[in-house]
Image (cartoon, rainbow, N blue to C red):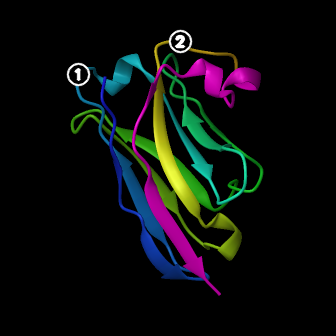
Amino acid sequence: VQLQASGGGLVQTGGSLRLSCAPSGRSISSLTMGWFRQAPGKEREFVAAIRRSDRTSYYTNSAKGRFTISRDNAKNTIYLQMNSLEPGDTAVYSCAAGTRSPILSAINSPNMYDYWGQGTQVTVSS
C-alpha cells in the first residue's frame, strides 16, 4: 500500500485547508486510516483516525470541533478538513493506514498502522 498526502499549504490564522490521502493497492474500506503530524523539534503527534470496522472517527483533543476526518469509498480517498487553523497546527501532516481495527484507546498509537506516506506541509501564519 502506498500513501500520498496532499492539500497542504500556507494559510492565515482562522483559515481552512483540506488534506487528502489516497492509498494505492488497497481499498480504504479495509483499512483503518489515520492522520499524524510532526512539527519541527517535536515528536510525531496523532491527529485523527477513522476505524475500519465501523467507521468510527477519533480525534486528539486539540482537533476536536475544528478538524473532521472523512472517507469517500468511491474515490478511495480520505480527507482531513481543518478549520479555524492556529499557528500551533503548523506541521508536516502524514496519513497512515492499518489493517487492524484497534480499540479506540489504541487508535492513536503509531504501532497500529502498517503503512505511512510522505507528508504534506501545513503552515499557519499569525
Tell me the element at label 2.
loop
89, above or below 3, in the image: below
Q: Is residue 27 left or right of residue 38?
A: left
Type of amino acid at the residue the image marks with label 2: Arg
Residue at the (42%, 21%) spot, across then down: 31
109 horizontally vs 114: left or right: right
Q: Between residues 49 and 90, which one lies in front from this camera angle?
A: 90
Residue 71 lies in what quarter of the image?
top left
Separation (CA) of disc 2 from disc 1: 17 Å
Residue closer to the observer: 88 or 65: 88
User: Relative to 59, is 122 above or below?
Assistant: below
Q: Nearer the viewer, mark 2 or mark 1?
A: 1
Residue on which the image places disc 1: 25
Q: Is residue 116 magenta?
A: yes
Quadrant containing the N terminus is top left
In the rendered image, residue 14 lying in the magenta stretch gets the answer: no
In the picture provided, is 63 more to the left or to the right than 81? right
- Number of on-image labels: 2
Q: Amino acid at mark 1?
A: Gly
Q: Which residues are magenta?
A: 104-126
Establish if 52 lies above or below 116: above
Q: Which residue is mark 2?
A: 100
**Residue 66 percent coordinates (x, y):** 63, 62
Question: Residue at 29% across / 32% down in the picture?
Answer: 73
